[in-house]
Image: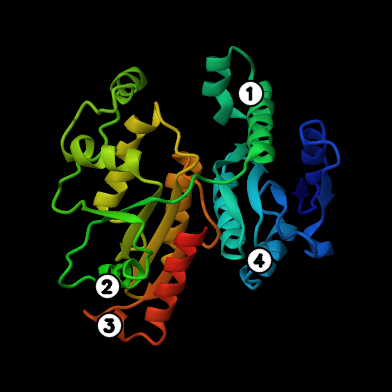
Amino acid sequence: MKIILPPDQYSGKLRAFLEPLVPPGSAFLDPDGGWEGLAGEKLLFAVALDEGGCNAACYRMLSVLRRAEGLLDGCTAGVVVTGVGELYTKDVARDVVLAANLAGCAFLGRPLVEATGSLRNFRVQAQIQGTDEATAFRLAAAELIGRLEAWTGPLPLRRVLALHASVRATSNTLALWEMVRRELPEHIEIQELCLLNGTVADCNGCAYTACLHFGGQGKCFYGGPMVEEVFPAVRACDALVMLCANYNDALSANLTAFVNRLTALFRQNRFYEKRLYGLIVSGYSGGDLLARQLISGLNMNKSFYLPPEFCLMETANEKGSLAKLPGAAERGAVFARRIAER
């Protein structure tokens, strides 16, 4: 295992924390020293943030990753981020995951262990485990490293579920999906569900015990199409494709409601071997903002596996303009092959 550790004044403490947890023979690497020979490796990105939630070496690493297509082909990774303050640990983690993923790196489901300066974010886990916050943090990091070391890849792809909240007659997002869908191999079963017009009410934040009770039955207290159609489809699929139109630099209300309501199913089901993909079409810009939302909501939180180059982002505004973009059909075909082969 290779541990990518951008150096700063706090990275030595993070290294000392990780050294007893990583497998024997693991190597700690300074990303400023180069990226040669990493293809196909198990990677752990370990980032220590300063009082301002920054790490200058991490930003240099992001600059390399964002310009290096294929640099991390065949790699699978997890992430550990520590902070002095209470903010920015997850924000930095999302940046690292997106940049490394677009450079060819896959990420485990729930790939992030983050520790804020007070360790207050481990208070609930510590209470459940009957221990203190520092021990809960160490156990979480050890669990992540163990899963990364043992990971052999997702299950074979047989069934794809595509979710959207768009109107087919006018949607550039669905036009992009059709370019991808028609290139998928015939042996892959495809199910498409529309979450439009309030068919999925948002989560109302039931008590944990109530959510756990209904989730154990594959249900939710509020029922409806989410329980009757969406939950069974999620359980049956091997890959989830989120079709995301970007209007206001955020997932639409219905797709956000889907992520929130999925908590009930997640209470009793982990999705480690289900792949997550995203098709994102922006009217102006900001597709990367939605990609980060998919990463944090469904990969980091709900445990979906993130395949290499998990998302395809396009910019198209006027009705029908997506189909006129130079090379759009070719990019859709490449993305379809990526789904089928990875």
Q: Residues at badges 2 and 3 in contact (C-beta under 8 Å)?
A: no
| Residue 60 rendering spot, x and y as whole percentages | 71, 65
Q: Residues at badges 3 and 1 in contact (C-beta under 8 Å)?
A: no
Q: Residues at badges 3 and 4 in contact (C-beta under 8 Å)?
A: no
Q: Which residue matches tag 4?
A: 65
Q: Earlier in the sequence, mark 1 or mark 2?
A: 1
Q: Earlier in the sequence, mark 1 or mark 4?
A: 4
Q: Earlier in the sequence, mark 3 or mark 4?
A: 4
Crowding at dot 1, Cα within 10 Å, few <14 / some 14-19 / many 20+, comes out as many
| Residue 89 rendering spot, x and y as whole percentages | 59, 45
What kind of residue is marked 1? Ala
Q: Secondary structure at mark 3?
A: loop
Identity of the residue drawn at 49% across and 42% down: 273
How far apart marks 2 and 3 lie (CA) works out to 9 Å
Q: Which residue matches tag 1?
A: 136
Q: Can residue 84 be seen in the rendering of this structure?
A: no
Looking at the picture, does residue 291 appear above or below residue 43? below
| Residue 242 rendering spot, x and y as whole percentages | 35, 56
How far apart marks 3 and 4 lie (CA) works out to 30 Å
Q: Is 185 left or right of 196, judged from the image as shown?
A: right
Q: Nearer the viewer, mark 4 or mark 2?
A: 2
Q: Secondary structure at mark 1?
A: helix
Q: Earlier in the sequence, mark 4 or mark 2?
A: 4
Crowding at dot 2, Cα within 10 Å, few <14 / some 14-19 / many 20+, comes out as many
Q: Earlier in the sequence, mark 2 or mark 3?
A: 2
Q: Examine the image and state in which quarter residue 279 appears.
A: bottom left
Q: Can residue 264 be seen in the rendering of this structure?
A: yes
